[in-house]
Amino acid sequence: MLQTTESMKIRIFLLLTFITLYQSVNAQQFGIQGGLNISKTSGEDFWYNSTSSLPSIHFGLVVELSVTEKIFFNTGLLYSVKGFKQNPTVNNNNNYGPGYGDYTYDIQSMRYSTGYLEIPANLTYKLPITSKLNLCFHTGPTFSYGLYFKCKGTNSSTYDYTNNNLDSKQKYDFGLDLGSCIEFDNINIGINYNQGLKNLSYSDEAKNKNRVLQISVAYMFRKKTVKQNKEDVTI
């Protein structure tokens, strides 16, 4: 039953990927996007109760489909790295009782990161400012497929490995996007916040979910519309 469920999830993600690539061929607008991720986990448990943000990257293909004159559907296929840093001191008093003090690891810090393939599915509202300048607002879900998990200590070779065989807790994630951008001609400069909705913690008592602030730049390749026999023709 577990293998069947895993197979179905892979098939669904591959179907979403195929639909996204098909849409990019027929879309009125498509482009490339890249930028900065600043990620962390929400919630705390024994292992992750002293964490800080992890800077990383995202980039890939973006697609825009017109719904109305001002409302658009945005999707794409992005490579995005999410994770967090673990600080060297972890307070264990609440776990083992008073008198045990703090435990300090023999490393400066730990970096935990997971590389994902992401498919966003956002609705965007465009508010025209000038003929070439729009202020845009978007929201919608994001579906993610994990490619690998990395764990690295800053001054210890003991904690430096990559796991390409992710289990079900790490392999799939989904979240909610909320953001805005300035669109000037073919250039989009935007900011997006993604709140993960899936609990990635192995502990039943903890709630650890991805949360990512993204700053990005996109360049859109737009198909031109010309007049031919008094009808609009897209080329």
Image: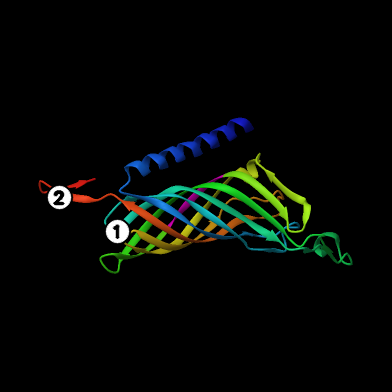
Q: Given the image, on which type of amino acid does mark 2 rest?
A: Lys
For the C terminus, the image quarter is top left
Is residue 142 one of those drawn in magenta? yes
Asked whether, in this view, residue 222 is left or right of residue 52, the answer is left
Is residue 164 one of those drawn in magenta? no
The residue sitting at 63% across, 41% down in the picture is: 168
Q: CA distance from mark 1 to mark 2?
A: 22 Å
Q: Residues within 10 Å of mark 1 (few under 14, many from 20)?
A: few
Q: Which residues are magenta?
A: 139-145
Q: Given the image, on which type of amino acid does mark 1 rest?
A: Lys
Q: Which mark is residue 70?
A: 1
Give the camera-side residue of 233 and 178.
233
The image shows residue 9, relative to residue 185, as above or below, that is above
Q: Which mark is residue 227?
A: 2
- Picture coordinates of residue 54, whole percent (x, y): 63, 60
Q: Is residue 88 visible?
A: yes
Secondary element at image label 2? strand
Magenta-colored segment: predominant secondary structure: strand
Give the camera-side residue of 218 and 23.
218
The residue sitting at 37% across, 57% down in the picture is: 124
